Amino acid sequence: GWICYAEKTLGSYILPYISSVKSPQQVIGAAIKHHMVEKLGLKPYDVYHVTVMPCYDKKLEAVRGDFVFSVEEKEVTEVDSVLTTGEVLDLIQSKSVDFKTMEESPLDRLLTNVDDDGHLYGVSGGSGGYAEAIFRYAARVLFNREIEGPLDFKVLRNSDFREVTLEVEGRPVLKFALCYGFRNLQNIVRKVKMGKCEYQFIEVMACPSGCLNGGGQIKPAKGQSPKDLIQQLEGVYMQDVSSSMLTTFHVGCRALLLFAILILYPY
Ligand code: SF4
C-alpha cells in the first residue's frame, strides 16, 4: 500500500530512499521460481505458485512487470495467484472442511523456517522484522555490538510510531523507526521533504498495526471489536514460538495441503 502511494503520489523526493529489497512475497516468489524449481528438476513454468497474504495490494504487487521473467520464450511470474487469508477461509468453508476430523499430516519441509523441535526462527511479532534484522546486522557489522534479547523500541506519538536507538560511548549511532498507518506516515514524509528526518532506516507499513490489520484478513468474530482481535493476534505472535506457532502451523499445514492439491492439479 505504501509503495503504491509513494509511486503515485510522492514521487521523486521519496522514491530514491525506498529500499530495493523485495517484499517477503516476492522474495519467496523468486526463491521458488529460480531456486526450488531447479532443486526439484522442474521448469519455472511447471510450477503454479500461490501465496496467502493479508491484503489485496499483494495481488497488485504480484502482477507488476518487475516480477515477470521469461524462460524458453515463455512468460513466467514469480507469484501466479494471491489469496487473502479471508479468501482462504471462504475457500475452506465452501469445501466444508472440518479441521477437527482431519488426520494430522507431517510438516512440509520443502521451504520452512521451523526447526526439528518446532521452533520458528526469525523475530517475534506480526510486523517489524525487517527493521529488527537490519538494526541487529548494522550494530554488529558497523559497531561490533551484538544485541541480545528483544530490541527496546520506544513508543513515540502512538504505538504505531516507535523508534530504537543504538548508543556507543554515550552517543546515538543508529536510529531506526517503525512507522505504520497513513497518519504517522504523513509526518515522516513531511520530515523527509524538509530534510529533517533523523532516521537511517524506517520500516513503513500502510496499515495501522501492520499486516495483522490488513484489509484481506479474517474479520473479527461476532461481538469482537477489531481492536480486540488485533490485540489477540499480536499476543499470539509474541508468545513462545514453540507452543503457539506450532498450533498455527498445524492449522496452516492443512491449509497448505489444500493449496498443494490446487498447485499439483496441473500434473
Ligand atoms: S501493511 Fe497493509 S497494505 Fe501493507 S502489506 Fe501489510 S496488509 Fe498490505
Image (cartoon, rainbow, N blue to C red):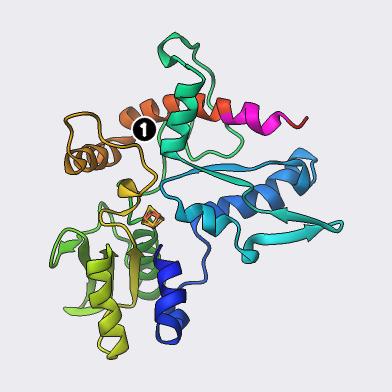
Residue 115: horizontal and vertical position, in percent?
47, 34
Magenta-drawn stretch contains 72: no
Q: Quadrant for ligand 1?
A: bottom left
Hey, which quadrant is residue 206 in on the image? bottom left
Residue furthest bottom in the image: 194
Residue drawn at x 18%, y 33% is 224
| Main secondary structure of the magenta stretch | helix
Q: Nearer the viewer, residue 211 or 7?
A: 7
Residue drawn at x 30%, y 37% is 219
Split into 4 quadrants, where in the image is the N terminus?
A: bottom left
Tell me the magenta residue range: 259-265
Q: Is residue 170 left or right of residue 247?
A: left
Residue 77: horizontal and vertical position, in percent?
68, 54
Which residue was labeled with disc 1? 245
Q: Nearer the viewer, residue 196 or 206?
A: 206
Asked whether the viewer can see residue 126, the reply is: no
Q: Nearer the viewer, residue 238 or 57?
A: 57
Hey, which quadrant is residue 201 in on the image? bottom left
Asked whether the viewer can see residue 156, the reply is: yes
Q: Is residue 255 left or right of residue 187?
A: right
Residue 136: horizontal and vertical position, in percent?
35, 63
Q: Specify the amino acid type for callout 1.
A: Met
Label 1, ligand 1: CB separation under 8 Å: no
Secondary structure beneath disc 1? helix
Residue furthest right in the image: 72
On screen, residue 118 above or below 4: above
Q: Nearer the viewer, residue 128 or 12?
A: 12
On screen, residue 248 above or below 175: above
On screen, residue 108 above or below 167: above
